Image (cartoon, grey):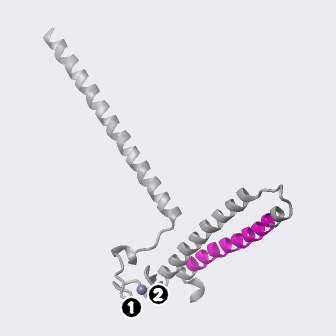
Amino acid sequence: MALFDPKAKVISGYQRSIDERSSSIRKYYDEIGKLYYDQYKDMNVDNTKDINTRCEAITRLSNEIEEYKLKILFEKGLKKCPNCGTENSLEYGFCFKCGSKFDEDSAKEPKTEFEKAEEKFEEESEKAAETAEEAEEKAEEAAEEVAEAAEEEKKED
Ligand SMILES: [Zn+2]
């Protein structure tokens, strides 16, 4: 039953993320229009900074929407050709339309920039924890050596 399809649930979650971003983008467009008009009407007003902040937000949100669209495609067993944009089956090695070769990772689940950043942070934390553990082990070894040397000295006395 489609209602209980876990894939449909995942896809509708991604779709919600897209819808939220689309409505934010519309809101920013409205605000930019108003800011620009205020500046046009009164020569003393400079809204450049506020306008640019919103333009940057729109770019970021648009990129995130593209990421979620790729995730939805993946759930449907599809991927997009980076050359011509045609949707292909995940298992295809070459785009059926333009013949471009897909890279090896193209069949894997696409990650958003946020997910990539999260993974990188986790990896770095793990590495840092390992380094700390190693340092602790070395310190313990050094302490043991000192203790052994002291023991030896005692015997010699
Ligand atoms: Zn193509």
Query: What segment is highlighted magenta in the picture?
Result: 9-36
Question: Does the CB distance between marks 2 and 1 fall below 8 Å?
Answer: yes
Amino acid type of the residue tagged 2 in the rendering? Thr
Identify the residue at horizontal 75%, vertical 67% (top origin): 32
Residue 139, quarter of picture: top left
Kindly state the secondary structure of the residue where label 2 is placed: loop
Residue beneath label 1, please? 96
Disc 1 residue lies near ligand 1 with CB under 8 A: yes
Query: In the image, is 31 to the left or to the right of 8?
Result: right
Residue 18, quarter of picture: bottom right
Identify the residue at horizontal 60%, vertical 85% (top origin): 3
Whether the magenta-drawn stretch holds residue 15 is answered as yes
Q: Nearer the viewer, residue 45 or 21?
A: 45
Q: Nearer the viewer, residue 51 or 108?
A: 51
Q: Quick one: which residue is furthest to the top in this view?
A: 157
Residue neighbourhood size for the residue with mark 1, other residues' Cα within 10 Å, grouped as few (<14), some (14–19), many (≥20): some
Residue beneath label 2, please? 86
Counting from the top left corner in percent of width and height, residue 154 is at 19, 12
Amino acid type of the residue tagged 1 in the rendering? Phe
Kindly state the secondary structure of the residue where label 1 is placed: loop
Quarter the C terminus occupies: top left
Identify the residue at horizontal 46%, vertical 72% (top origin): 110
Counting from the top left corner in percent of width and height, residue 12 is at 60, 79
